[in-house]
Image: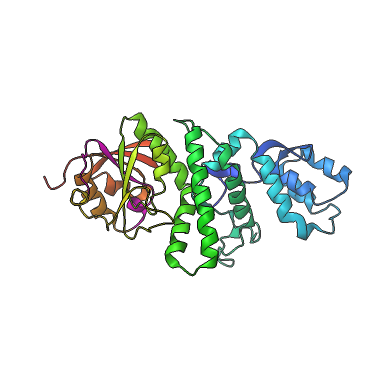
Amino acid sequence: MMRINEFRGEYDFLSNFYEHPMLYEGQAFRNSEAAFQAQKTTDQKQRLRFSAMTASEAKREGRRVSLRPDWDQVKDQVMREVLMAKFADPTLKKKLVRTIGIHLIEGNTWHDNYWGSCTCAKCGDKGQNVLGKLLREVRHKYREEVMTYDRYEMTSADVQAKKQLMEYDSRLMRLARNQNNIDLDMEEDCIAHLWQDGCGDQYILMAHEIAARGFKKVIDIGCCTGYQYLYFKAHGIEMMGIDIHPFKGLEPAPIRMETCTYPHPLHEIFDYDPEETVGVSSLCMSYLGDIEPMFRQAAKDFKYLIITLNRDKMDIVEKYFHLEKVERDIYWLTSRGDPDK
């Protein structure tokens, strides 16, 4: 998984020291650090002083206030609420949600191993990273409210597809609690991946892009359970898929799924026109396994691919495909031609 190891530069908005006005419990603050530090006391006069403070000033003042007796018990919940208030701002909310799929770590060198993880030689980057965990919670809570991408607006059909996946996941979880079934556990993990961890939003964006370019068929390499077909179905796109071990599911497979370890030539499995069928992969092709053989074969199987591309593998992919960035880490690939010709 990709990581953000410190909240600086491009990701400074994740830091509580980021200067951005906000409201918390009816009081205005210059930054979320001041909002948090103000809650250390129940003295309203002391709290009011934090409104005009910079983050550094607030942190120092927070060490001097009359500390409320329950602070250790409530501080995590207070931080959670402060972060919810901070990221209620539409601009910050969208920036936070765009980090979905990335592990957030409040790396530091000042030995804060509760809220973050100190990277000095003594501490060894083994902190609890509570702030990073709370940011991920807030990110998950707000993701349904961020309904637009740079290129597309999420439709009601997209939202309905996500809801259907959530309902199916709930059924799987209920069964998994009562059964010792590794296949069931694996399918539940795959379904959760499709709507909790950012992969589902990637599929929605891919479906929009494929439909906008006029294609009606896709083959998903690494199709897991096949239930991402709901995202494509919302745009009138037919889906087929391959996986190393596709799970039969609670119901008959909603799509044609074949057991296959890529790079097995797909024309031996499916009858399809590479000019009209787009290859799709949200994770497997550029994050798992030896990717050069996969992309070498993909250049024979497809004229077009749309994938989530691991950026440190671009030099390999560019041997076989022309790359066009769609958004975030999603790329539209056009084959340079059969590498054996």
Q: Is residue 31 visible?
A: yes
Residue 239 located left or right of residue 300: right
* Residue at the (47%, 35%) spot, across then down: 157
Q: Nearer the viewer, residue 113 or 2?
A: 2
Residue 77's spot in the image, x, y percent? 72, 53
* Residue at the (39%, 44%) spot, across then down: 229
Residue 295 located left or right of residue 6: left
Residue 138's spot in the image, x, y percent? 62, 47
* Residue at the (76%, 50%) spot, across then down: 60
* Residue at the (59%, 59%) spot, across then down: 117
Membership of 281 in magenta stretch: yes
In the picture as drawn, the residue positioned furthest to the bottom comes out as 180
103, above or below 151, in the image: below
Count of picture labels? 0
In the picture as drawn, the residue positioned furthest to the front comes out as 252
Q: Which residues are magenta?
A: 270-288
Residue 324's spot in the image, x, y percent? 33, 36
292, above or below 163, in the image: below
Residue 214's spot in the image, x, y percent? 31, 30
Membership of 138 in magenta stretch: no
